[in-house]
Amino acid sequence: MDRIDLLRIFIRVAESGSFTHAADTLQMPRSTVSTAIQELENRLGTQLLARTTRSVRLTDDGQRFQQTALRLLGDFEEAENQFRLHSSETHGHVRVNLPSRIGRLVVAPALPAFLEQYPGLDIELGMTDRSINLAEDGTDCVLRVGPLQDSSLIGRRLGLLPVFNVASPSYLERFGTPLTPDDLSAHQAVLYASPSTGRIEA
């Protein structure tokens, strides 16, 4: 089997913790996934996964190799995409998950023009603010706001989003205008709690 395919299969098994689930998301027989992991372990000369009847977990060598595999696969895909200059070459089914507000207000309105440029793409768009497991949900990529929580994922910053505190004129007339950030503690506020961390986003 191709070495890049071996890396992809290993990463999917490592993230999902299951040969069966990895096989389902990769749309290949479980036996193929198991054989690929065995071939990869034979190539490397070490055991990457500890298998029991109920679970699959990374060994110490597996944890170290996972970081290498993610970097190698990311570099390969970046190099591969570097030469795909024509929209006719871009095709396939992509499952994407976005925060609901960004999905509704930014991405969805831009989709018609994007799909006109890349007609070969079939995009399955999901919107949720909660943290999801890419391997278990079969999601190819996600867009999230804030620091990356899972260090095993490949993340790239796409931009910055400014955050504003706002108030209606009637509220300010009734309760006064805060002049410093410390003044906000004495005011009424609608706060947003991060679904992934539970932290209040002030």
Image: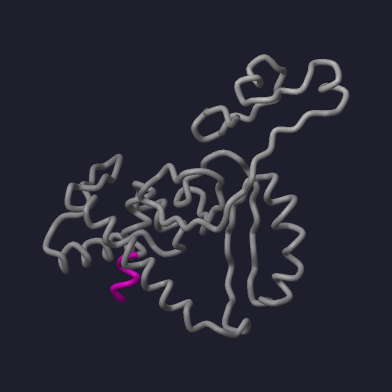
Quadrant where the C terminus lies? top right
Quadrant where the N terminus lies? bottom left
Q: In which quarter of the image is residue 178?
A: top right
Residue 4, magenta (yes or no): yes
From this view, report whether residue 52 is shown above or below residue 88.
Answer: above
From this view, report whether residue 201 is shown above or below residue 25.
Answer: above
On the image, the x and y values in percent for residue 53 come to 26, 42
Q: Which residue is drawn at 57% across and 56% down?
A: 159
Q: Quadrant of residue 43?
A: bottom left
Does 54 sit left or right of 94 as displayed? left
User: What residue span does the magenta drawing correspond to?
Assistant: 1-7
Give 19 or 101, whichever is nearer the viewer.
101
On the image, the x and y values in percent for residue 6 come to 30, 67
Residue 134, magenta (yes or no): no
Give 148 or 184, whichever is nearer the viewer.
184
On the image, the x and y values in percent for residue 114 come to 70, 70
On the image, the x and y values in percent for residue 32 come to 33, 65
Q: Residue at x 73, y 57 (%)?
A: 108
Q: In which quarter of the image is residue 24?
A: bottom left
Does 199 sit left or right of 31 as displayed? right
Q: Which residue is drawn at 60% across and 40% down?
A: 129
Give 164 or 126, whichever is nearer the viewer.
164
User: Which SS type dominates the magenta stretch?
Assistant: helix
From this view, report whether residue 97 is shown above or below residue 3.
Answer: above
Q: Residue at x 37, y 73 (%)?
A: 76
Does 197 sit left or right of 16 as displayed? right
